[in-house]
Image: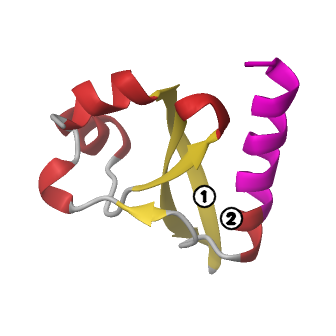
Amino acid sequence: MEGGELRKSVDSCLNELKADAQGGIKIPRNLWPRDYVKNYGITNLYKCNLAGAQRLLYTIYVESGTVKVLAIDFMPHKEYEKLFGY
């Protein structure tokens, strides 16, 4: 896969999240990696499917009355499957 295609996919995902932070696919709480909860204190977890079978994981939080998106991880689908036990 060409790097430009992946970059366009990431840019598209981020633009969609600017319009709707909950636009990704919500991951059920029982599947959240413990390290994400411990290290980031997440209260929600979403993913975006990207070109080349890549995944972008993110959480949404509110800071000073503004909704923010924090990208937590980026990985190939096989690594994503292993992390979530699929």
Q: Residues within 10 Å of mark 2 (few under 14, many from 20)?
A: some
| Residue that appears at 87% across and 26% down | 4
The answer to which of 65 and 26 lies nearer the viewer is: 26
Q: Which numbered disc covers residue 58?
A: none
| Residue that appears at 53% across and 73% down | 22
- Say if mark 1 contacts mark 2, CB within 8 Å: yes
- Percent of width and height locating residue 59: 47, 56
Judged left or right of residue 23, residue 28 is: left
Tell me the quadrant of the picture where the N terminus can be found. top right
50 part of magenta stretch:
no
Mark in the foreground, 1 or 2:
2
Residue 21 vertical placement versus 1 (above, below): below
Magenta stretch, residue numbers: 1-15
Q: Main secondary structure of the magenta part?
A: helix
Disc 1 marks a residue whose amino acid type is Val
Disc 2 marks a residue whose amino acid type is Leu
The answer to which of 3 and 61 lies nearer the viewer is: 3
Question: Is label 2 in a helix, a strand or a loop?
Answer: helix
Q: Residues within 10 Å of mark 1 (few under 14, many from 20)?
A: some
Judged left or right of residue 22, residue 28 is: left
| Residue that appears at 25% across and 45% down | 37
Q: Which numbered disc covers residue 69?
A: 1
Q: Which residue is mark 2?
A: 17
Question: Is label 1 in a helix, a strand or a loop?
Answer: strand
| Residue that appears at 51% across and 38% down | 55
- Percent of width and height locating residue 47: 47, 52
- Percent of width and height locating residue 83: 25, 29
The answer to which of marks 1 and 2 sits earlier in the sequence is 2
For marks 1 and 2, give the CA distance.
Answer: 8 Å
